[in-house]
């Protein structure tokens, strides 16, 4: 063997007969734990990202996938409205959609990616430990971990799986590069990191820090050497992939200018409190994942003297000091603890940008690997006595544990019994938990049994029940929100649902009351409340009464299609029969809906008549954002009779309105009325030449 050629121990991972059998065992365990998820439907974001997403219906949409946002079909402007840029996720959905549009195929893909992730856990663990038993145990613990049920069951949570896969591929290729010095593996390390970024934003700090941990704690390279250009170049390559990622992100959604932020900026005391308490809360989630919840309420507090904070601080401090103790000895155990710390970083980042719900079980998918390593480490230690203990000082720490489980056979019986208990209890939790992901109603009802104060889940449930035609049940849920949380941030939607209920029940007065409450609660933030009340009046034939609400909806969101369509519908009704003009004029001027304005914002300038038509021109000084209703503009004769107007036009550059009147009315028109969206109308008299 040549001097610089790697030894057989350091060569690439070899897939032998045992490894193949191990991967088959992994597939069996994935099937045993998650087979019932294949029969589930779509839930939550699955509808927007899969069912209602036109991006994934044709391979021709590939450019839109690379340079678009995750919810482009549901947003007016990706650059303004979206933070998430995950083209790998959308690309996977596109490919799966070409095979089948049924939910089971998307759940099956989740299982396949999860199985692949478990295989990578085994490969990575085997590469740095060179111990098959430890690696097998780590991967099996990873498969059965109950905290993964949310990610595996929820089709839209596949970015967690994809990001995890590419993060591990990056770290695996870095191990290969360290041992073989082949540039190909360094390139694959960078490419995998780039794909992890395109899968989920949270991968950004993970790979560089994990590589630093590998160098410092496993390869035992001191910091001084790591600062040399020869070592720094790999970080420069990673930085290059970050630059390319941000350029793509900038082209697609405008970089980070749309970064979501907490409604109320937290204080320094709150940040310190949450840092330590959230860390311990996450530790509890990965080491004791029961009971599982879709919604976790984590109380934001600034109390630095409370028992909860003090205990959390002491737990963090003890773990950190233990890490420093191990780090001085370059122990593999120190690397596990290091990964446990850095894998939690995205959870803290999410706290900065999220609302009150700062924790979800899917955020623990990556950190759970650190827990699996630690548990497998100690079980392997008991099974094999001195496995991975590379220092006599470290080994002496666990002497009491060894002495408690002598002889060797006794330790193995204990480990085997513990593993059987873990596997059976995990299967019972996971297989039972899978069932709640069957559909939205099952998920929401189960969640509310655990966290009845989750008003947003109750709102989702009411919407589902309403869509299913169960109006009484939907009403019960909406009324429960009003009772529990009258200041709920989306209370206008709740009022709107109740209004829809009473409209369906044939109680118009009650329906109108709740539509008006929805408008009051929306505080002009949602066009839907105004459009819904306008549609209610439109349905009742009260067209003029509906107009101001459609106008207000358009002013709030000019791109909203519903109020535009409703407004056009009213315009067609008014313009369809000239015989109704006298009645329409009376309704506008004396019906109580429109009020005559005392302001003079529209002035008559001149007219020009031919044999067939007369053109009347007016100069305008309308307020900013003021909208006239052209289909309600009418000429008025000396006798007060309304006359029809044809082809009204507005020259924005010259602020001039031109009205076309049949020449047979020459000399009869003495005034025009110009109704606007605010429920006012301007009346302008004219002089005849």
Image (cartoon, grey):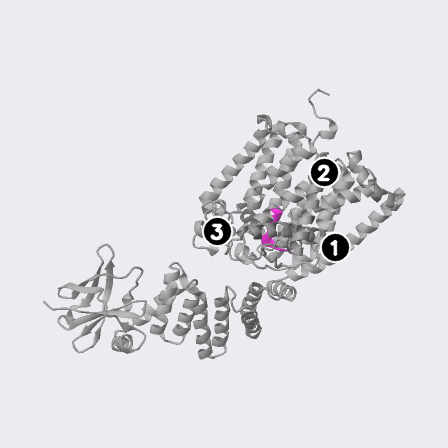
The image shows a total of numbered marks equal to 3
> Seen in the image, is 199 located left or right of residue 601?
right
Crowd around label 2: few <14 · some 14–19 · many ≥20 (10 Å): some
| Above or below 369: residue 12 | above
Q: Is residue 544 left or right of residue 497?
A: left
Measured from the top left, where is residue 397 in percent x and y? 80, 40
Q: Position of residue 570 (x, y in %)?
A: 34, 70
Per the rendering, the mark at residue 10 is: none
Residue on which disc 1 sits: 426
Identify the secondary structure beneath mark 1: helix
Which residue corresponds to mark 2? 325
Q: Is residue 541 left or right of residue 502?
A: left
Question: Distance between the Cα atoms at labels 1 and 2?
Answer: 33 Å
Ranked by sequence position, the earlier of labels 2 and 3 is 3
Q: Which residues are magenta?
A: 153-162
Which mark is first along the chain, 2 or 1?
2
Mark 3 highlights which residue? Answer: 82
């Amino acid at each position: 063997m040549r001097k610089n050629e790697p030894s057989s121990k350091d060569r690439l991972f070899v897939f032998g007969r045992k490894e193949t059998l191990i991967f088959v065992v992994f597939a069996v365990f994935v099937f045993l734990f998650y087979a019932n998820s294949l029969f589930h439907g779509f839930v939550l974001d699955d509808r927007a990202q899969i069912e209602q997403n036109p991006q994934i219906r044709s391979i021709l949409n590939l450019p839109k996938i690379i340079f678009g946002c995750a919810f482009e079909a549901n947003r007016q402007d990706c650059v303004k409205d979206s933070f998430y840029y995950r083209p790998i996720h959308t690309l996977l959905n596109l490919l799966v959609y070409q095979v089948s549009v049924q939910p089971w195929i998307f759940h099956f893909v989740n299982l396949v990616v999860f199985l692949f992730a478990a295989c990578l856990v085994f490969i990575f663990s085997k590469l740095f430990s060179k111990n098959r038993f430890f690696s097998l145990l780590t991967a099996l613990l990873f498969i059965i971990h109950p905290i993964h049920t949310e990610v595996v069951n929820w089709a839209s949570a596949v970015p967690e799986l994809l990001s995890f896969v590419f993060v591990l591929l990056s770290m695996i290729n870095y191990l290969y590069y360290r041992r073989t010095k082949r540039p190909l593996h360094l390139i694959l390390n960078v490419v995998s990191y780039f794909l992890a970024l395109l899968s989920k934003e949270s991968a950004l700090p993970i790979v560089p820090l994990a590589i630093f941990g590998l160098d410092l704690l496993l390869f035992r390279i001191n910091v001084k050497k790591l600062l040399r250009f020869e070592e720094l170049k790999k970080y420069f390559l990673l930085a290059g992939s970050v630059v390319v990622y941000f350029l793509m992100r900038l082209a697609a959604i405008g970089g980070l200018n749309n970064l979501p932020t907490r409604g109320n900026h937290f204080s320094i005391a709150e940040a310190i409190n949450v840092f330590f308490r959230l860390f311990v809360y996450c530790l509890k989630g990965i080491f004791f994942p029961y009971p599982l919840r879709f919604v976790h309420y984590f109380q934001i507090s600034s109390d630095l003297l409370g028992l909860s904070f003090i205990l959390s601080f002491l737990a963090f401090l003890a773990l950190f000091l233990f890490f420093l103790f191990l780090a001085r000895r370059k122990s593999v155990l120190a690397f596990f603890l290091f990964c446990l710390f850095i894998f939690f970083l995205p959870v803290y980042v999410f706290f900065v940008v999220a609302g009150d719900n700062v924790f979800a079980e899917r955020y623990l998918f990556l950190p759970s690997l650190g827990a699996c390593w630690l548990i497998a480490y100690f079980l392997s230690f008991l099974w094999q006595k001195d496995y991975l203990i590379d220092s006599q000082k470290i080994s002496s720490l666990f002497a009491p544990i060894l002495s408690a489980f002598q002889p060797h056979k006794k330790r193995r019986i204990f480990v085997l019994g513990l593993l059987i208990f873990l596997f059976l209890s995990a299967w019972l939790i996971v297989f039972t938990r899978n069932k709640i992901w069957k559909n939205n109603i099952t998920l929401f009802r189960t969640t509310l049994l655990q966290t009845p104060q989750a008003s947003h889940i109750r709102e989702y449930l009411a919407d589902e029940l309403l869509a299913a035609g169960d109006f009484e049940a939907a009403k019960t849920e909406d009324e429960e929100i009003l009772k529990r949380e009258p200041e709920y941030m989306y209370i206008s939607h709740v009022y709107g649902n109740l209004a829809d209920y009473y409209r369906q029940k044939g109680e118009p007065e009650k329906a109108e009351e709740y539509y008006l409450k929805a408008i009051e609660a929306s505080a002009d933030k949602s066009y839907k409340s105004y459009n819904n009340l306008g549609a209610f009046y439109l349905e009742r034939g009260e067209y003029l009464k509906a107009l101001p609400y459609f106008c207000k909806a358009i002013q709030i969101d000019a791109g909203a299609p519903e109020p535009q369509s409703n407004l056009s519908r009213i315009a067609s009704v008014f313009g369809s029969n000239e015989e109704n003009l006298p009645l329409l004029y009376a309704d506008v001027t004396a019906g109580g809906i429109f009020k005559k304005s005392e302001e003079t914002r529209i002035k008559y300038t001149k007219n020009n008549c031919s044999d067939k038509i007369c053109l009347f021109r007016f100069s305008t000084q309308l307020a900013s954002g003021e909208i006239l209703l052209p289909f309600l503009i009418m000429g008025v004769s000396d006798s007060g009779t309304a006359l029809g107007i044809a082809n009204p036009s507005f020259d924005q550059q010259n602020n001039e309105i031109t009205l076309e009147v049949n020449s047979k009315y020459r000399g009869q028109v003495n005034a025009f009325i110009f109704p606007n969206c605010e429920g006012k109308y301007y009346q302008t008299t004219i002089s005849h030449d």
